[in-house]
Structures are given as structure tokens and as C-alpha cells.
Image: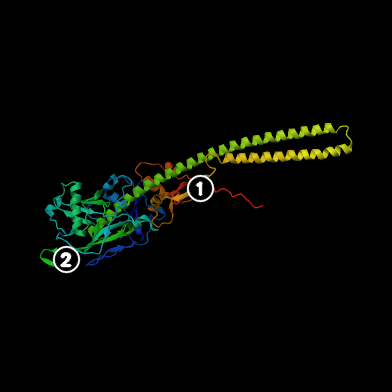
Amino acid sequence: KLQFLYFIEGGIMFARPAQKTPIAGRGSYPAPPVKKKVPHVVKEVCSKPEVQTVVGNFPVADLPYNVKERRVVEHRVRNPHRRYLPDDLIGVTAWWTEQDVGMLPWKEGGAVITKSEAKGSGILPVAAVTITKDKQDTCVNVRAVIIPEAEKEGGKTITKRVQVIAAASDTNVSLYGGVIPDARHLNDEQLTSRLATLIKEQSGADLSSAKWVKVLHIHYSSSPPTIIYAPILSSSPAPVFSPQVTPASPTNPEDTYHVTPVRFNLATVIDYEVHSTTPHDTLEFCMAVDAVHEWGKRDMAEKILEVLRIRGEEARKKVGEDMLLSEKLGAKKRKRDEEDERRMKKREDRDRELKQKWIEEDEGKTDEEKRVVMRERQEILKGIRAQDAADDESRKNHEKEEDQQDGQETTYKQKVQVIDQSQLEAFQYFDRPNEGSITRLTLQNILLCTINPITLADINTLLNLPYLPRRQEHLPYRKLAAQTVEKVVEIVPETPNTDV
């Protein structure tokens, strides 16, 4: 049985037999299995080692991030690591594309998971509600992709610090929420209100005051549509998610249905391998995380574009400042050289006139008289040389005072490099192994997917920075995330030597 991998090159989609690589859906790392009875404890899953999505040596290029309506084939090309999709999938609407850049759900707020148990009120959670076929046309499957605030920097990339809270039931892992009957006529505010009620029943977390962002709308041919929202968890105190136990059957109270909150980091779900037997709810959970991941790629790509423009402007500004400084120093040096030349010429004329005067005075004198006046003349020359040395010392002090003007007699500005963590995270988002470099081709593909069209010529101009290697394929990005900050340093005056 041949599996095919689709990739884009030159705007044309190609297919080649899939090899045993993570992009072909093999060799990645499965999520932990869900047991029949989930213990009532908090589960936190550690991510596995990550790999870059490549075909041979050619990185799989993304498509433009601002496309909202997507058919199945486009969704598949955008997510080549997902081997299986729902059979009745028609397409998706990426509502997150309408959000402003910088509005990622993990920017603020937080969520807490506890080990406490709470009894449900009898409402069957997650996908336990059974809808008859005659009512499916009016139903909406409403889910929440819950993302707390990202963990603080601890040496891990952002995809390992961003976590997703999901619901582990007795059969699968899914997003919190469920099917709402007669809901096609409801607007977003009404749907999120119903969704908050479901989450309250399923986890005990109160999200009634949260601000909701529409992330994804999944369209099916024979199933109710699924609409996925993301709460902005900026309320205080943070919502608390806890395990819930609910009767699975009204006639048999002992048959219980367990829903336990679990946490996955973003990298784990991205690398999770789906199969033909993967439950439908888990497939939608992966689709939601893929949408959030692409949302993050869009914002990080825009951040990289902004950083490159800033660094280019700084480089041009530095070139201009260096030219001005060079011209200023050159003009000062020329002025001082001219003054030195005039001073030396004046001294030479003085010495020549003095020598000529003494020659005229020595005419008609005896040798004894000449020896007497020679001693006097040596004292005169010694005084002249001492005066010249004093004048030179005074001139040097004056030039030193000129060099320390504009308030820099007591302080000076020292330029230091400071790493901007938000800028560094933007590059690390596309560097899953966290090697500290991105290939030039990958960086071009990233920038070509940004919101506003950009040409390769523009990108090459942005990458034409003095500290980036021009002929090297791998570009180190840490210097790109370094900001030049001027630090005022006080000059400590020299202590005069009082030793005798």
C-alpha cells in the first residue's frame, strides 16, 4: 500500500511515495493512550524530540496565511503531517485570519488544573449527546481550544511552552464542548454562552466572563458543522479545571462517565500521528491545534519581517552615522594638520632669521668672542625650545577638551547588545530543533507567506546585513534578535599622584 506525500514547488502540487519520515506520518511520536477509566489526577504530557518538516533537503513551503476559505486539498497541503482527515470533510473556514497580528491566545491570562473531584449535574459531557439524523441539520458542534498563558522562558522553544487543555474521556481525547441542538440560527455570542455552560459542566471551570475568539469552522457533508472558539483567559482569578464524574445512563447510576483535564504542549500535538482508527473528536482536536499553530506562524512571520526591517534601518542609520563621524573627524584632523603646518613653518622662519642674525653679528669677531656669545646663544635656544614644548602641551590639552565637549566630560555612551526575547521567539518558532539558525530558503518561504505581498528581491535586500553571511545557507538569527542599547557610563576622574 503506497502512501503519497503532497508538497508545493513553483506553485504546482506534486506527489511522491511517502518514506518513513515524520512528514509522511511515520516515525513521529504518539500521544499517551487513554485508559478505559481515566484516574482522577492531572496529566501533563512531555513532548518528544522534534523534527523539521522537510522533503529531502527541500523545506515544505507554507501557503499564504491570510487565506480564510480552504477546501480539503488546500487543508491537506497546509498540514502534510496529518495522514488522515475525516471522510466527510468538505473544507474549513480559518476565522483566526481575521484577528489582528499580536492577538495570540497564549499572550496573557492563565488556567489551573487541580486534582479535586466534583460531581456533575447529570448533563452528559463532550460527545456523549446523541443526536438523531432528522435533527442533525439544525445542530452545531461547538468546541473550545483552551490555551493558558505560555510558560516563562526556561530554555525551551515557544511550542514547548504553550500548552493546550483538553478533555480525556473514557474513550478519547477531545476539546471541551459538545453538540448543541437547534443552534444553526444562534450567533457567536449565544454559541459561546452555551459553550461556557458545557465547559462548566465538564470541568467546573467558569469561563462565562471570558472573551471568545472564533478560530475554526469545520464543514462536513453528512455531519453537523464544528465551530471552534478560543477563550482569552485574562480574567482573575484564573479558571480552575478539575475532573468530573457524571452518570453515563439515567437508569444505571453506577455506570459513570469520566472527564479529566489533560495538558499537552503544542509540539506534542503537532507531532502526534493520527491513524484511520483515531476518533473523530481527536481528529478535530488536532485540526484545532494545527489552526492555532498556523496562527502562531503568521504572527511570528510578521514579527520576523518587522525585525528584519528594523535591523536594516539600524544598519543604514549606522552607515550614515559612521559617514558623518568620519567626515567630522576628517575635517577636524585637516584643520589641526593645517594649524600644525603653519606653526612649524613659523618656527622654521624664526629659527632661520635668528641664525642669519647671528651670522651677521659674528662678522669681525675673534674666536674667543664667538665662544663667549655661543654659550649665551645656547641658553637662548634652550629657552625657545622650552617655550615651544609648553605651547605644544597647551595645544594638546586644548584638543583634548574639544574631544570631550557636548557634556561628555563626566559621562560617555557605551553601546551594548541586548537580546529581545520576543524577537528571538519569532525565529525559534520555525526552528523546532532549536539549533540557532534557519536556512535562507526557509526564511524566504516564511516571508513570502506574510499578509502583504513581498518579492524575493525585497527579501534579499532585507537579508543584506553586515553580520549575516552572504554565501552561507544557514543563517544564525540570534544577532537579528539583538538590540543596540546605549548605556551611559560615568567617567571616573584620575586621582593625581601625590607621592613626592
Q: Is residue 388 above or below residue 60?
A: above
* Amino acid identity at mark 2: Thr
- Element at badge 2? strand
> Which residue is at the front of the view, 409 or 333?
409
What is the quadrant of residue 345 in the picture? top right
Disc number placed over residue 273 in the picture, else none? none
On the rendered structure, is 466 left or right of 39?
right
Residue shown at 81% from the left, 38% from the top:
376
For the residues bearing labels 2 and 1, Cβ distance under 8 angstroms: no
- Residue 160 position within the rendered picture, expressed as x and y whole percent measured from the top left: 35, 58
Q: Residue at x 51, y 41 (%)?
A: 319
> Is residue 459 at least partly visible in the picture?
no
Give the residue number, with chain letter if any, for mark 2.
256
Q: Quadrant of residue 258?
A: bottom left
- On residue 489, the disc is 1
Q: Is residue 31 left or right of residue 181?
A: right
Regarding mark 1 in the picture, which secondary structure is present there?
strand
Q: Nearer the viewer, residue 432 or 343?
A: 343
Q: Report, in whole angstroms, how far the alpha carbon at label 2 lies from the one at label 1.
A: 69 Å
Nearer to us: label 2 or label 1? 1
Which mark is first along the chain, 1 or 2?
A: 2
Query: Label 1 is placed on what type of residue?
Result: Val
Please, is residue 418 above or below residue 316 in the view? below
